[in-house]
Image: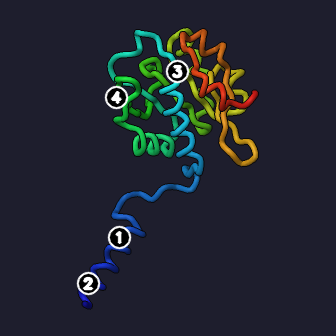
Amino acid sequence: MRTLITILTICVSASLFGQGGESPRLEDADPNAAFKASFLFLFSTNVDWPDSRKSGEFKIGIVGNTPVFDELVYSFASKLVGSQVLTVTEINSLDEVTDFHIVFVSRRSSDKLKEVVQRCAGKPVLVVAEAPEALATGAEINFVIIDSLIRYELDPEKAANAGLLLGSKIIQYAVKP
């Protein structure tokens, strides 16, 4: 019995204190990461993508937000978007942004939003951000906090200019910018 208690104590201690990995830094915490990941998946399944984007993998790229990346990988990687397998990638070089269906630019990396928008201009890439004035900068969708809830605003005209038709569910749940 004493051996069983010792083993349980070791297991609980290991789970509480980690197993040699880095503990997350407080500034990396994002209490809304799961909601943002869910919305990004909703966007992927409720946009009419051009035929040129309906084969191969469905790619979501993340610029500068590990918690949203982690949530997307944990909850949605390998799920199907139509007939395409969803993949999630952290974008290390902005040269890659046009390779993705959706590019999410985190608040921490909002200084890169303008360049992402410029690189994606006229291409079928849905740019999603979480920064003040993100729609004015050129993002099609922007996460906002309203009454302590994560919501999003959008610009369907910008999406249409990129060859993307936003579905009624996306439009229905959006707030006015």
Marks 3 and 2, how far apart at CA: 54 Å
Marks 4 and 1, how far apart at CA: 34 Å
- Where residue 41 sits: x, y (%)? 49, 33
The residue indicated by pointer 1 is: 14
Disc 3 element: strand
Image-quadrant location for residue 79: top left
Marks 4 and 3, how far apart at CA: 16 Å
Image-quadrant location for residue 118: top right
Marks 1 and 3, how far apart at CA: 43 Å
Residue 75 is tagged as none
Assess disc 4: are there few (<14), some (14-19) or many (≥20) residues with their C-alpha within 10 Å of its C-alpha.
some
Give the mark nearest the N terminus, 3 or 2: 2
Look at the numbered discs 2 and 4 and tell me whether their residues touch, using CB distance below 8 Å.
Answer: no
Disc 2 element: helix
The residue indicated by pointer 4 is: 85
Give the mark nearest the N terminus, 4 or 1: 1
Look at the numbered discs 1 and 2 and tell me whether their residues touch, using CB distance below 8 Å.
Answer: no
> Which color mode does the image show?
rainbow
Amino acid type at image mark 3: Val
| 13 relative to 122, above or below | below
| 61 relative to 163, above or below | below
Give the mark nearest the N terminus, 1 or 2: 2
Residue at the image position 72 percent from the left and 31 percent from the top: 175
Residue at the image position 56 percent from the left and 56 percent from the top: 26
Between marks 1 and 2 in the image, the one whose residue lies nearer the viewer: 2
Q: Which quarter of the image is occupied by the N terminus? A: bottom left
